[in-house]
């Protein structure tokens, strides 16, 4: 089975979905078959790629997951679209042990067909995030280069540690990504220094710059890589992709 990256942060607005979408697209363009799973009830990863949310989430709809996949373009990206239905969120959050085991089995069957699976999770440390972590092999955490960058990380890391200890060693800490990097601001450099000194080598060398193209791309139903291929942020996500592949 390939690698499964769980993109998590309990804070919103840190570039989590932007990273999930564009890293998945970059991996696919590198020749890796890639699945993007939208677990966030906001469904931004789904709509940001020009796909409508489904009426019932494939993970609780009872259908074969392969039939629910949406193939996007010719690059090899497949999307398991999200649902905004409250009943689906409730069903995913309140699974009993037998239902959770069935879910893991369903996901494992699909994941086995891809080199990479990327989970876009809600901005929380709740049950949906824990479910994704339990089905993943690596945790991937974006942190914005702003004042409250370290806020809440202790709780997030504690949740990750709990899943690591209960999951039989499957989950690993894949890396931390600095986002919204603005080299003109002194605060940006201070946050980068603090994060790199505290976390060391697990922080990716690549930083994701602030770029209006990243905000515009979802309104066109495209990744920023396809919307603005010559932009700074596209170059950064392609460099990040190469780093992820190097860490295999």
Image: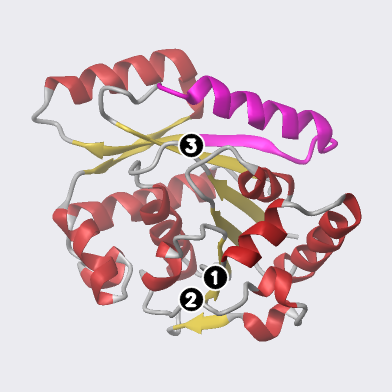
Which residue corresponds to mark 2? 53
Q: Is residue 102 above or below residue 233?
A: below
Residue linked to disc 3: 10
Give the alpha-carbon distance from disc 2 to disc 3, as whole Å: 22 Å
Using residue 247 as the reference point, say whether residue 104 is left or right of it. Answer: right
Q: Quadrant of residue 101?
A: bottom right
Tell me the residue at 71%/61% (across/down).
91
Viewer can see residue 115: no
Whether residue 4 sits left or right of residue 62 in the image: it is left
Mark 1, residue position = 83
Callout 2: SS: loop
Label 2: few (<14), some (14–19) or many (≥20) C-alpha neighbours in 10 Å: many
Which residue is at 73% across, 45% downward? 134
Counting residues from the start of the chain, the first of labels 2 and 3 encountered is: 3
Precedes in sequence: disc 2 or disc 1? 2
Residues marked 2 and 1 touching at CB (< 8 Å): yes
Residue at the image point whose x is 54% and y is 70% from the top: 83
Residue count near mark 3 (Cα–Cα under 10 Å), binned few <14, some 14–19, many ≥20:
many
**Mark 1 to mark 3: distance in Å?**
20 Å
Kindly indicate whether the residue at mark 3 contacts the one at mark 2 (C-beta within 8 angstroms). Answer: no
> What stretch of residues is rendered in magenta?
151-175
Rounded to the nearest angstrom, the CA distance separating label 2 from label 1 is 5 Å
Q: Assign a secondary structure to mark 3.
A: loop
Quadrant of the snapshot with the N terminus? bottom right
Residue 61, picture quadrant: bottom right
**Is residue 165 inside the magenta stretch?**
yes
């Amino acid at each position: 089975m390939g690698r499964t990256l769980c993109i998590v942060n309990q804070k919103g607005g840190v570039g989590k979905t932007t990273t999930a979408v564009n890293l998945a697209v970059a991996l696919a363009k590198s020749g890796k078959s890639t699945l993007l799973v939208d677990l966030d009830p906001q469904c931004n990863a789904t709509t940001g790629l020009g796909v409508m949310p489904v009426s019932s989430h494939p993970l609780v709809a009872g259908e074969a997951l392969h039939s629910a996949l949406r193939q996007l373009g010719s690059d090899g990206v497949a999307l398991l679209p999200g649902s905004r239905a409250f009943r689906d969120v409730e069903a995913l959050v309140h699974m009993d042990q037998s239902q959770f085991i069935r879910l893991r089995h369903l996901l494992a069957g699909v994941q086995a067909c891809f080199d990479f699976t990327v989970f876009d999770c809600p901005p929380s440390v709740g049950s949906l995030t824990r479910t994704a972590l339990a089905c993943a092999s690596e945790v991937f955490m974006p942190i914005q280069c702003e004042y409250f960058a370290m806020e809440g990380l202790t709780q997030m890391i504690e949740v990750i540690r709990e899943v690591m200890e209960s999951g039989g060693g499957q989950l690993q800490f894949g890396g931390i990504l600095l986002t919204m990097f603005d080299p003109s601001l002194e605060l940006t450099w201070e946050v980068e220094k603090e994060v790199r000194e505290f976390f060391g080598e697990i922080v990716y060398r690549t930083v994701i710059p602030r770029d209006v193209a990243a905000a515009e791309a979802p309104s066109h139903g495209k990744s920023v890589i396809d919307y603005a291929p010559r932009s700074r942020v596209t170059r950064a996500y392609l460099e990040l992709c190469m780093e992820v592949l190097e860490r295999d």
